[in-house]
Image (tube, helix red, strand yellow):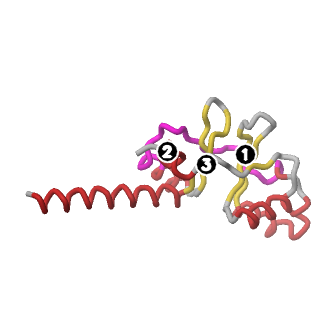
Amino acid sequence: MSVEHILAEKGRDTVTITPDKTLADVVDMLSRHRIGAVVVVDGDRTVRGILSERDVVKALAESGAEALAEPVSRRMSTEVATCSATDAVPALMAVMTEGKFRHIPVVEGGRLGGMVSIGDLVKHRLAEMEAEHKALRDYIATA
């Protein structure tokens, strides 16, 4: 199974923000959309960074409430691991586990095409395993 299968089911809509917005804007978006990270993009949806709830907590620990007035560009991670829609789910799970991150933007043609989380990957992998298990049970029952 590939990332494309996940995007086809969950959709490609991705919450984004621009580098000039503030951490307070990010906190509002994370809360309002009930998500753990936002992708930082420029005007043509080129991925410039990612900002997660962990990044916000780190900023608050370092600078206190004043961090909320800082621009996203100051606190975003700029070295963003990305994937393509053709990437295989098991390989992507390994990359995310090794890198210790939970969200990965999907880039197509140099632009943001969606985002998947480790939860999305696990959900689809479990569904795939259940389908395989059912197929084996059905095969054994008819043998």
Instruction: Report the span colored magenta.
Output: 73-92
Q: Residues within 10 Å of mark 3 (few under 14, many from 20)?
A: many
Q: Position of residue 127 (x, y in %)?
A: 39, 59
Does 74 appear in magenta?
Answer: yes
Check disc 2 and give the amino acid type.
Val
Check disc 3 and give the amino acid type.
Met
The answer to whether 104 appears left or right of 16 in the picture is left
What residue lies at 74% left-to-right and 41% top-to-bottom? Answer: 48
**Eyeballing the image, is 49 above or below 117?**
above
The answer to whether 137 appears left or right of 35 in the picture is left
Mark 2 = which residue? 3
Q: Quadrant of the C terminus?
A: bottom left
Q: CA distance from mark 1 to mark 2?
A: 20 Å
Q: Position of residue 53 (x, y in %)?
A: 71, 63
What residue lies at 45% left-to-right and 51% top-to-bottom? Answer: 94
What residue lies at 79% left-to-right and 49% top-to-bottom? Answer: 17
Q: Residues within 10 Å of mark 2 (few under 14, many from 20)?
A: many
Q: Quadrant of the N terminus?
A: top left
Does 61 appear in magenta?
Answer: no
Mark 3 = which residue? 115
What residue lies at 55% left-to-right and 41% top-to-bottom? Answer: 83
Quarter of the image where one finds residue 44? top right
Closer-to-camera residue (81/7): 7
Closer-to-camera residue (58/53): 53
**Eyeballing the image, is 109 above or below 21?**
above
Closer-to-camera residue (52/119): 119
